[in-house]
Amino acid sequence: MASARLASWVCLLVCILSVLKTNTQCVDVTNTILPHALEKGAVCLDGTPPAYALQEGIGEAANNWIIYLEGGGWCASEAECLFRTTKDVGSSNRWQKEQSCLIAMLSDQQNENPYFFNWTRVYVRYCDGSSYVGDREEPFIESNTTVYFRGARIFDAIMEDLSTRGLLNASQALLTGCSAGGLGALLQCDHFRSMLPQSAKVKCAADAGFFIDGTDIYGGHWHREYFAQIVQTHESYKNLPKSCTSKMNASLCMLPQYFVGDIMTPVFILNSVYDTWQIENILMPLNEEQLDVHDEFAPCGHDIENCTCDQVKHWRRFQSEFYQALTHLNSSSRNGAFINSCASHCQTQKQETWCENNNPISKLLISASQPLQGVGQAIGEWFINDSKFRKIDHRHKNPLVCEYNPEEPHWNNHYTFRGTNLIIPNYTMVDEVNRKLHLVPQCPAEIPAYLQESQYCLSDVC
Ligand SMILES: *[C@@H]1O[C@H](CO)[C@@H](O)[C@H](O)[C@H]1NC(C)=O
Ligand SMILES: *[C@@H]1O[C@H](CO)[C@@H](O)[C@H](O)[C@H]1NC(C)=O
Ligand SMILES: *[C@@H]1O[C@H](CO)[C@@H](O)[C@H](O)[C@H]1NC(C)=O
Ligand SMILES: *[C@@H]1O[C@H](CO)[C@@H](O)[C@H](O)[C@H]1NC(C)=O
Ligand SMILES: *[C@@H]1O[C@H](CO)[C@@H](O)[C@H](O)[C@H]1NC(C)=O
Ligand SMILES: *[C@@H]1O[C@H](CO)[C@@H](O)[C@H](O)[C@H]1NC(C)=O
Ligand SMILES: *[C@@H]1O[C@H](CO)[C@@H](O)[C@H](O)[C@H]1NC(C)=O
Ligand SMILES: *[C@@H]1O[C@H](CO)[C@@H](O)[C@H](O)[C@H]1NC(C)=O
């Protein structure tokens, strides 16, 4: 028993070292710009044509397609969208000169991406600010800048262009993406399916795209209002799932919990229950009128170790609302889910969270005895072998550090629960779990009832 445990610790250490040593390289791919899309008004916020990067697959596997929608937040008001026109998230100007870096889920290396490396892989650049569903005829004009709201047209123009490159001959296709792109993959899922031949196997997977309708620290629903504004500004309601807009106010229909159960195509939800974007923006959005409340909570929101027992309740409520939202995913169908506890956002885009063989995290998060090797394997088996994969980490009450590269610039770096840990020499996942167990305040009655209630389990593993 003791030696088996030691052996698995040694394995973890070896595995972690090999992650650190992996020198993952981008595949640099020239962007395809779609000048013809201009005629259809399928343009970025600043009026430039949309773009994607494609690397062809090998042999027969080239008929298998993975289409990855880039993310990058949203713009909710005309002014915010105007601001984006000078940025990469609102213009293709820079992509016309620069290449795209295909990595992790889009890697062409078998050891980095064992299930999809030889497929045709497409990285769709994000420049509409609406998760690929806006479609407003009237532009917004401010002095000499014209702003367009055409996300859905961009999606269609890109699919049309890919059709000429063989997409309509696909034998398998996975529509995916992260964050705003992950949400786009869910919103466009059935539409995408309808474009492809019936004989093709088609599925959709959202990474960090399951934005919940959660309660914020002020007791309100700032994020719900924010999404409502996006839907109005971009007139996205025209393209949101009809199954949802026919039942409720369309401004709610960008929130996955209100439409995910009605998606006909099989979907996979990959998300952390402590998704850093969601903690920052859904749980603790900056509220100018209640800065005192925000500032008082901030140390706890950025590092759960700094919470008082009273504040920990906000985290627990968020966690509870997240699991509740997930129950909307049809559990009887071919849908999959992998919900872990990493302090992260976009696990398909980084080798250390995507790659299977080297990464001990998921194994640790779910169960040491499970043969699961990671996020990539979960999605790969679910897509390719049609295996039922629904796992939620209910073992860890607190966010865990799951990324290993402190050198890599990333907006999550300001999270102290990531940054500080990683500069400790030889810091491992085992240290991380132990640290969380000991340092986070143990508050009375903090384990909510849902942890015992089986209806919150999507799987046999809870
Ligand atoms: C693509 O890779 C998979 C997984 O390794 C393999 O089974 C398949 O034969 C490959 N296809 C081609 C055409 O090389
Ligand atoms: C208008 O265009 C001029 C010249 O192209 C530019 O210098 C100026 O910044 C623009 N004004 C606004 C408000 O974008
Ligand atoms: C689709 O496949 C057919 C038959 O194999 C072929 O004739 C056609 O050129 C292909 N179309 C594209 C766009 O690749
Ligand atoms: C739908 O929600 C929006 C945003 O909350 C609100 O402005 C609008 O009045 C609602 N529409 C209806 C028909 O209730
Ligand atoms: C999802 O489940 C509901 C109720 O369980 C059912 O009515 C609906 O048809 C299901 N949707 C799909 C796409 O399977
Ligand atoms: C959490 O507490 C530690 C120790 O008091 C402090 O050094 C750190 O800055 C705090 N973190 C945040 C995000 O405030
Ligand atoms: C998934 O399918 C591949 C090829 O069909 C097979 O080699 C592999 O063993 C399968 N994996 C599982 C877990 O069944
Ligand atoms: C970290 O691990 C390496 C290899 O095991 C060892 O040589 C080194 O002394 C360790 N560093 C610290 C600070 O423990």
Image: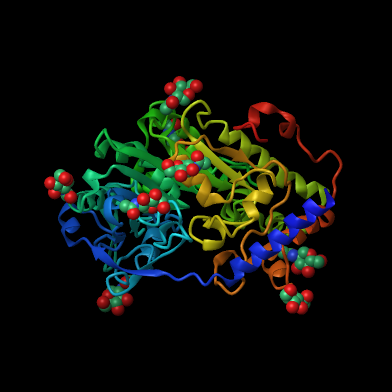
Q: Position of residue 279 (x, y in %)?
A: 62, 52
Q: Residue at x 62, y 71 (%)?
A: 406
Image position of 396 with respect to 52: above or below: above
Q: Residue at x 48, y 59 (%)?
A: 349
Q: Residue at x 18, y 58 (%)?
A: 38
Number of numbered discs visible in the structure rendering: 0
Q: Residue at x 57, y 55 (%)?
A: 277
Q: Is residue 456 visible?
A: yes
| Lateral position of residue 175 relative to residue 331, left or right | left
Q: Position of residue 377 (x, y in %)?
A: 52, 48
Image position of 241 with respect to 209: above or below: above
Q: Quadrant of residue 361?
A: bottom right
Q: How is the image coloured?
A: rainbow
| 75 or 369: nearer the viewer | 369
| Lateral position of residue 458 relative to residue 245, left or right | right
Q: Quadrant of residue 326?
A: top right
| Lateral position of residue 161 relative to residue 449, left or right | left
| 456 or 415: nearer the viewer | 456
Q: Which quarter of the figure is the C terminus placed in?
A: top right
Q: Is residue 48 visible?
A: no
Q: Position of residue 425 (x, y in %)?
A: 73, 74
